[in-house]
Image (cartoon, grey):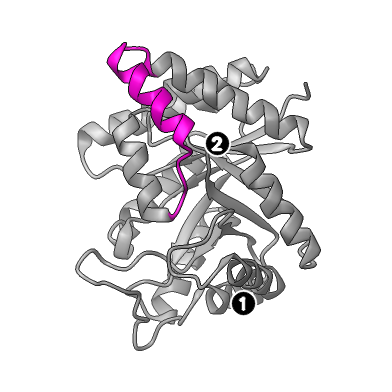
Amino acid sequence: MTTPAISFEFFPPRSLEASFRLWDTVQTLAPLDPRFVSVTYGAGGTTRELTRDAVQTLHKSAGLNVAAHLTCVDASKAETLAIADEFAACGVRDIVALRGDPPKSAANFEPHPEGFSDSCELISALADRGTFNIRVGAYPEKHPEAADQTADIEWLKRKIDAGASEAITQFFFEAETFFRFRDACEKAGIDAPIVPGILPIENWQGARKFAAGCGSSIPAWLEDTFEKAVRDDREELLATALATELCSDLIDGGVEHLHFYTLNRPDLTRNICHALGVQPQVELRDVA
């Protein structure tokens, strides 16, 4: 089996305790030499400043290639591009450009009166800067707001045409889900790399909630298997085995890069990477 390239997603800390957890996560996973790490925005842009600070710290102190999430939510075009320019000023050249989730108080996304109306507008503006490598999100199963998956694929093509170089998918639970999506994208003329997103299942109930919110279907066999594992206190063992099998199937199907949603809990992700043959390569730089 070919050893894959890997990348990780982190979220910015909201407390001192969470800051320590993030740094512990970085110390655990950075030696695996990820291609990049990404740092999320909270729903409604609630962690904008925290994201900026975390991106700058990880880039400067840990020496990682950081891809900063940037969204269209609750900010003017000028404010959004000013944040992008701050990233560029500190040496960050990778951005994950997203429309973003609406604030929890809002049922639907509403553009800021002076903001970007959608992710394609944001991508185009970032591409015009000529500074960034732009990644975008993709949905191997229908986005909750999309009419159908054909609309999702058409929208992804628009994002690539606007200036994105790569897409990272929402998580899924069966390799065939990704392969069907990849084939449909190729048929639609999308030739940019599409990286599968992997969610190691740290907590089954939490994973079910995430899946319901983003449209990831849960196969009946997975539901039954995890319910039994939880009863038998074998949840972590099962999670490691299933994620490793999913990743192995993807690699056998030609996937070269895997993106892990770590939830700032690194042990399960590290164990899966080790099982795939990804071993420590580098030492983490000391914090300045």
Q: Earlier in the sequence, mark 2 or mark 1?
A: 2
User: Is residue 170 depicted above or below 77 in this figure?
Assistant: above
Judge by depth and name the residue closer to the eye, 36 or 4: 4
Image location (x, y in percent) of residue 254 = 79, 37
Pointer 2 residue? 63
What SS does tag 2 mark? loop
**Real-space Cα distance between discs 2 and 1?**
28 Å
Q: Which one is in front in this view, the residue at disc 2 or the one at disc 1?
A: 1
Give the residues drawn in magenta, as a range: 215-235
Q: Is residue 223 magenta?
A: yes
Q: Nearer the viewer, residue 54 or 219?
A: 219
The amino acid on which the numbered mark 2 sits, given as a three-letter code, is: Gly
Q: Position of residue 27 (x, y in %)?
A: 45, 24
Q: Nearer the viewer, residue 62 or 210?
A: 210
Residue placed at 63% from the left, 69% from the top? 150
- Left or right: 104, with 272 as reference point: left
- From the image, give the main secondary structure of the stretch colored magenta: helix
Query: Visible in this render: residue 12?
Result: no
Tell me, for residue 124, which label it has, or none: 1
Q: Which mark is residue 205?
A: none
At horizontal 58% and vertical 58% (from top left) the residue drawn is 138
State which quarter of the image contains the C terminus: top left
